[in-house]
Amino acid sequence: MIRIAIMASGNGSNAQALIDKAQSLANIEIAAIISDHDKSYVVKRAELTKTPCIVAEKTGTQDEHEDIILNILKDLNIDWIFLAGYMRILSEDFVEKYPNKIINIHPSLLPFFPGKNSYEDAFEAKLPKSGITIHYVDEGVDSGEIIIQESFERLEEDTIEDFKARGLEVEHRLYPQILEWVNDGKL
Ligand code: GRF
């Protein structure tokens, strides 16, 4: 089995999409959800779907916190890490331990609008299209090699909520697709 860890800090709708997809993938096991927030809804989702979940709240320095997570990943023999709304930048040391095995989903057409609040930034830019990017994680901020991008429209009459909802629909289709590629040995 290919053992996956999902790292998430918040709502976990992408984590949910991955958990749901994994049910139909013969080679994939979601070995754990790792959250840095005890109160995040993703922890509740783990409970509801009976997915193993480990909470590693931030204590001490970034290095100390990452060491705790790295030990968890090692103990669980994790092969791939899917970041799904994980709100911390991973250090170079961390990323080097899993070369080309950490993937992130980002809600803009990178390299445009990296970092936080990308839905808001892309919405404010009033461009006719925005999109979703799935990329490998390197030591930079949303700068790793792009695996796939898909655009969606930004209509003039959109509210930020309409815009986000359209984007999330793409996210929830695209991220499971990548999990399928990992299942099929295509990545
Ligand atoms: C998503 O928009 C994702 O692209 C970004 O953070 C958000 C997480 O949403 N990295 P959720 O927690 O998966 O619902």
Image (cartoon, helix red, strand yellow):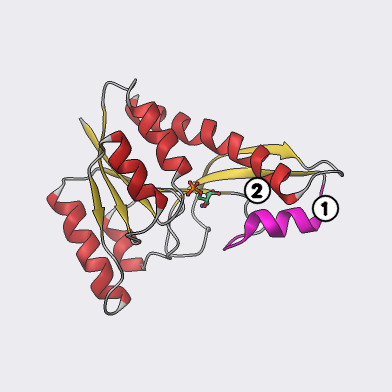
Please report the bounds of the magenta region as a residue range. Answer: 114-127
Q: Which residue occupies the foreground of this view, 137 or 39?
A: 39
Answer left or right for 27 relative to 131: left
Residue at x 35%, y 24% (from the top left corner): 184
Was residue 121 drawn as part of the magenta stretch in this picture? yes
User: Can you give x and y, in whole percent of width and height, for residue 131 in the image?
Assistant: 66, 43
Q: Name which residue type carries label 2.
A: Leu
The residue tagged 2 is 109
Residue 187 visible in image: no
Residue 70 circle label: none
Disc with the residue nearer the chain's start (2 vs 1): 2
Which quarter of the figure is the C terminus placed in?
Answer: top left
Residue at x 80%, y 44% (from the top left corner): 158
Q: Which residue occupies the foreground of this view, 144 or 157?
A: 157
Residue at x 53%, y 58% (from the top left corner): 143
Answer left or right for 13 relative to 113: left
Which quarter of the figure is the N terminus placed in?
Answer: top left
Residue 126 circle label: 1
Q: Residue furthest bottom?
A: 60
User: Can you give x and y, in whole percent of width and height, for residue 22 in the image?
Assistant: 34, 28
Was residue 86 drawn as part of the magenta stretch in this picture? no
User: Can you give x and y, in whole percent of width and height, for residue 76 in the image?
Assistant: 16, 47
**Residue 38 higher or lower than 84, as above or below:** below
Q: Name the element at disc 2.
A: loop
Q: CA distance from mark 2 to mark 1?
A: 14 Å
Q: Which residue occupies the foreground of this view, 116 or 49?
A: 49
Q: Name the element at disc 1.
A: loop
Foreground mark, 2 or 1? 1
Residue at x 50%, y 49% (from the top left corner): 145
Residue 78 visible in image: yes
Q: Residue furthest left?
A: 75
Q: Name which residue type carries label 1.
A: Lys
